[in-house]
Amino acid sequence: MSETIDGLTIAFSEDGIETTKELGKQILSKGAWTTILFRYQDWDNAKQAYGPVKYSIRRYQKRNNQYWQKSKFNISSDDQARKIVTILSEWLEGSEKS
């Protein structure tokens, strides 16, 4: 939880290891409900290295001057991300013709 949008992060450390490393952050909407798209990598303990890049869309609700995570959707691969982009692009193109 955080008091500011800038303070919201997906980064997480455990036992001195950054187990989730934030690579990027884009704020999609602000207000009582805030939506943020994160780009990140998880630490793979077996390989002692970070795994592939992943993405997460997270929704936060501001209550009592704090942002509380309410939901999340993780995009687990570049292939899945490309499919989402392609479908949204097609839908948006179609809506412009309507």
Image (cartoon, rainbow, N blue to C red):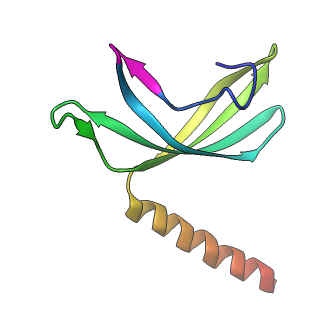
Q: Nearer the viewer, residue 53 or 97?
A: 53
Q: Nearer the viewer, residue 68 or 44?
A: 44
- Can you name the residue that lies furthest to the left here? 46
Residue 20 in the image: x percent, y percent? 41, 32
Quadrant containing the C terminus in the rendered view? bottom right
Which residue shows up at 45% across the image and 43% down it? 40
What segment carries the magenta color? 12-16
Q: Is residue 17 above or below residue 77?
A: above
Which residue shows up at 24% across the image and 38% down it? 49
Residue 10 in the image: x percent, y percent? 52, 32
Residue 52 in the image: x percent, y percent? 33, 50
Q: Is residue 15 magenta?
A: yes
Viewed as shown, does residue 1 lie left or right of 56?
right
Task: Examine the rendering and report whether any part of residue 75 can be seen.
Answer: no
Which residue shows up at 76% across the image and 77% down it? 95
Could you tell me what secondary structure mostly forms the magenta stretch?
strand
Which residue shows up at 84% across the image and 36% down it? 31
